[in-house]
């Protein structure tokens, strides 16, 4: 038997080992065809696994997502609300409607919907209907079928190792606030559970009006966090691992 292929195999194995590539998790299914169908299916397959976290790639769990800052929200009527100790549950429920790539613009577009629950502590000051509020309590907000359209512009950077890695250049997103939104704020009127419950009912009747103000800052945080995590994912795995479709050299950018 000619030993040439064996040698080649050994050499390529050594070559491979010297990079210490992290094996791709089995829920990541790279697309051999650059079609919307494949990207959508691959995203559907990837979400539950990625959201759980990939410890070997330094990726923390995304569900629940603890919101590590105070979020200020201005509501109509000079109402000021602050959220703290908040957590967002539901990124694992996100289902892609369609994921497409505009290769010439290096843009991925994720069109998806999710069910979210936000829990935390709130404080509220200002005028609401007939009441002057200065209160605090527990908040729970449920949003059904939140629609998100996320556009991510990436490039491929050539690292010193000689491997290409995706890098997120920029992103932007649009969201509408779902088919339904229900809030539960305890203690709206200090020490008066009955009026508090009535006021809450009134608020929930018009919850779509508040949805934007509530959802916006929390979604800003969640998507920024998810983009940071995605970048960590791209740093851990090479372009070749993630995209079996070869690139022409002009796609690469030297870091
Ligand atoms: C967040 O708000 C809470 C309650 O108002 C306050 O105790 C805490 O110090 C704030 N934290 C930051 C980082 O501003
Ligand atoms: C959101 O919840 C509704 C009602 O429970 C359910 O019908 C829908 O499938 C859920 N959507 C997602 C994306 O989980
Ligand atoms: C709101 O939450 C409180 C405390 O968890 C609960 O007692 C109350 O029934 C809830 N109200 C609604 C309208 O869900
Ligand atoms: C994402 O990363 C940037 C840069 O490191 C950082 O400033 C920002 O706070 C991070 N966002 C979140 C939500 O953690």
Image (cartoon, helix red, strand yellow):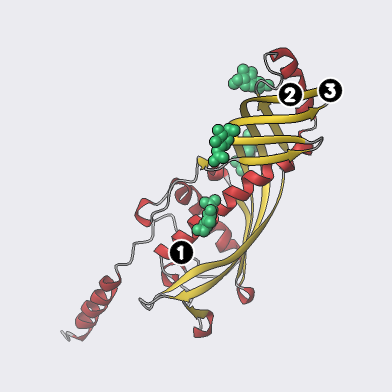
The local secondary structure at tag 1 comes to: helix
Mark nearer the N terminus (3 vs 2): 3
* Observer-nearest of 41 and 215: 215
> What is the C-alpha distance between the residues marked 2 and 1?
44 Å
Q: Can see residue 106?
A: yes
Residue picked out by circle 3: 130
Q: Are marks 1 and 3 in contact (CB under 8 Å)?
A: no
What percent of the width, then of the height, locates residue 155? 54, 73
In this view, the residue farthest toward the right is: 130
Question: In front of the other: label 3 or label 2?
Answer: 3
What percent of the width, then of the height, locates residue 224? 57, 54
What percent of the width, then of the height, locates residue 102? 63, 71
Residue picked out by circle 2: 200
Identity of the residue drawn at 62% across and 41% down: 71
> What is the C-alpha distance between the residues marked 3 and 2?
13 Å
Mark nearer the N terminus (2 vs 1): 2
Q: Is residue 199 above or below residue 213?
A: above
Q: Quadrant of the N terminus?
A: bottom left
Identity of the residue drawn at 53% across and 80% down: 251
């Amino acid at each position: 038997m000619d030993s040439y292929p064996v040698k080649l195999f050994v050499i390529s194995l050594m070559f491979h080992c010297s990079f210490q590539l992290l094996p791709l998790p089995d829920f990541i299914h790279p697309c051999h065809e650059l079609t919307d169908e494949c990207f959508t299916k691959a995203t559907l397959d990837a979400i539950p696994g990625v959201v759980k976290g990939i410890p070997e790639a330094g990726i923390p769990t995304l569900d629940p997502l603890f919101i590590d800052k105070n979020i200020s929200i201005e509501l109509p009527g000079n109402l000021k609300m602050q959220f703290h100790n908040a957590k967002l549950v539901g990124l694992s429920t996100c289902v892609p409607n369609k994921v497409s790539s505009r290769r010439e613009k290096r843009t991925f577009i994720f069109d998806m919907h999710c069910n979210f629950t936000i829990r935390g502590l709130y404080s509220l000051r200002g005028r609401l209907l007939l009441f002057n509020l200065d209160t605090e309590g527990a908040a729970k907000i449920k949003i059904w079928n939140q629609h998100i359209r996320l556009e991510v512009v990436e490039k491929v950077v050539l690292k010193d190792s000689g491997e290409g890695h995706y890098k997120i250049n920029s992103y932007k997103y649009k969201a509408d606030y779902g088919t339904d939104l229900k809030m539960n704020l305890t203690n709206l009127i200090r020490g008066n559970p009955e009026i508090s419950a009535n006021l809450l009912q009134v608020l929930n009747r018009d919850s779509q009006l508040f949805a934007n103000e509530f959802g916006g800052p929390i979604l800003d945080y969640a998507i920024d966090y998810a983009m940071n995590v995605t970048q960590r994912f791209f740093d851990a795995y090479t372009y070749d691992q993630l995209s079996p479709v070869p690139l022409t050299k002009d796609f690469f950018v030297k870091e």
